[in-house]
């Protein structure tokens, strides 16, 4: 058992939520596999919503301060740089990914980096109210000037250059704003902003830092790391997802942000599991105390303390031996495995 337990270091966690939480043989898995095989997608979307920090919809968000705060956040997100060479180095024992991931990456390829955005023609695939202002603070004027610019955009035909603004219209106003209020057909206010970004996606088996150690996962590592920096910037998490030395703060301004990223489900599952680890540890402690106190009599001769210790050792070796054997066979683990020692210990006590 001790020899088998050494295989625990070879264990890998299952990263595919479909395999974690959907029963094997479910028709949904077949449909998913069929769709991926026949209509493979190389695009990964990110969706974000900006609303008043109070959390209540209603106040008009079409103000100069809100738009400038969004522009500041946008510029910071565009400056996120992912070190692809480090990805290549970490995964060199799997394959040479220099062509796929080497070099420095940003979303739009600024500063002579590689661009991670999907393209709509020559432009990055992104929808934001800031495009109406050409991502330029000089174009964000008074409230009247803001509404005038938005209504000129709204009146123009899609896929044309907006007269008077000299910007190309690639989406409608309703695609980037919610709760729009109009007066005689003209936009007067809105309750929230919506943002869409689209990334190229290349899933490969790579080594990534997760849970404080290097793990082999199948993902697009550039997107994974870029999104980790992005969720920190927009204040969706308190601590950076993979850099424990960094803390995350909500962006300045009167808006708060929420969104759906490619890593969102994994982050939520990870947070939920992490929150339960402490409780599971406490349950182990309580049942061990119960075992020691209640097994046998309280006098020295009949206390059976040694028997209690043997039970704990047997349970531990059974779990680590079986887990190590699975590690040698390449069987992936899932979060529910953490409950096994508690169940075995409970049966052992009974």
Image: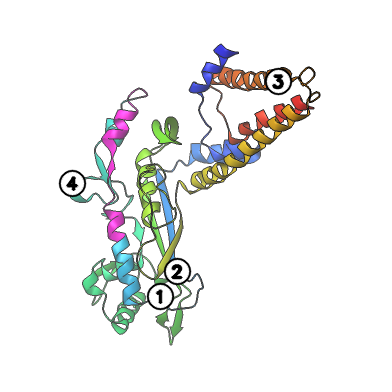
Q: Residue 32, percent across and down?
A: 56, 40
Q: Nearer the viewer, mark 2 or mark 4?
A: 2
Image quadrant of residue 319? top right
Local crowd size for mark 4, using a 10 Å CA cut-off: few (<14), some (14–19), many (≥20): few
- On the image, which quarter does residue 41 sit in? top left
Secondary element at image label 3: helix
**Alpha-carbon span between mark 1 and mark 3:** 63 Å
Label 2 to label 1: alpha-carbon separation: 7 Å
Given contact means CB atoms under 8 Å apart, are the residues at marks 2 and 4 in contact?
Answer: no
Q: Earlier in the sequence, mark 3 or mark 2?
A: 2
Alpha carbon separation for disc pair 4 and 1: 35 Å
Give the secondary structure at mark 2.
strand
Going from the N terminus, do you reach mark 2 or mark 4 first?
2
| The stretch drawn in magenta includes residue 85 | yes
Q: Residues within 10 Å of mark 2 (few under 14, many from 20)?
A: many
Residues at badges 2 and 1 in contact (C-beta under 8 Å)?
yes
Callout 1 touching callout 3 (CB < 8 Å)? no
Q: Name the residue beneath numbered marker 4.
A: 112
What is the span of residues highlighted in magenta in the rendered image?
A: 74-94
Q: Secondary structure at mark 4?
A: helix
Q: Which residue is mark 2?
A: 51
Q: Quadrant of the C terminus?
A: top right
The residue depicted at 32 percent of the width and 82 percent of the height is: 143
The CA distance from mark 2 to mark 4 is: 34 Å
Give the residue pinned by disc 3.
311
* Disc 1 target residue: 61
């Amino acid at each position: 058992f001790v020899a088998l337990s050494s295989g625990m270091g070879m264990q890998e966690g299952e990263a595919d939520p479909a395999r974690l939480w959907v029963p094997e043989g479910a028709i949904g898995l077949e449909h998913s596999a069929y769709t991926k095989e026949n209509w493979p997608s190389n695009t990964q979307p990110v969706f974000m919503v900006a609303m008043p920090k109070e959390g209540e919809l209603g106040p008009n968000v079409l103000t100069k301060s809100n738009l400038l705060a969004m522009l500041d956040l946008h510029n910071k997100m565009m400056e996120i740089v992912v070190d692809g060479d480090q990805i290549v180095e970490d995964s060199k024992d799997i394959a040479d990914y220099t062509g796929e991931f080497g070099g420095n990456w940003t979303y739009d390829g600024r500063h002579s980096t590689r661009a991670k955005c999907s393209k709509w023609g020559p432009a990055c695939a992104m929808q934001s109210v800031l495009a109406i202002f050409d991502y330029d603070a000089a174009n964000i004027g008074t409230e009247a000037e803001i509404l005038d610019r938005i209504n000129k955009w709204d009146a123009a035909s899609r896929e044309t250059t907006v007269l008077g603004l000299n910007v190309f219209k690639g989406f409608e106003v309703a695609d980037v704003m919610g709760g729009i209020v109009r007066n005689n057909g003209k936009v007067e206010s809105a309750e929230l902003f919506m943002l869409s970004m689209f990334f190229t996606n290349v899933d490969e088996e790579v080594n990534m830092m997760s849970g404080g150690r290097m793990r082999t996962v199948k993902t697009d590592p550039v997107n994974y790391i870029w999104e980790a920096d992005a969720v920190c910037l927009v204040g969706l998490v308190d601590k950076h997802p993979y850099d424990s030395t960094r803390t995350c703060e909500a962006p300045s301004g009167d808006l708060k942000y929420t969104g759906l990223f490619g890593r969102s489900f994994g982050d939520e599952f990870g947070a939920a599991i992490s929150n339960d680890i402490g409780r599971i540890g406490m349950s182990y402690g309580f049942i061990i105390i119960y075992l020691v106190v209640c097994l046998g009599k309280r006098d020295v001769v009949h206390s059976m303390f040694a028997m209690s210790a043997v039970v704990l050792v047997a349970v531990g070796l059974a779990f680590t031996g079986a887990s190590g054997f699975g590690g040698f066979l390449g069987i992936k683990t899932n979060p529910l495995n953490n409950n096994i020692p508690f169940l075995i210990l409970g049966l052992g006590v009974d």
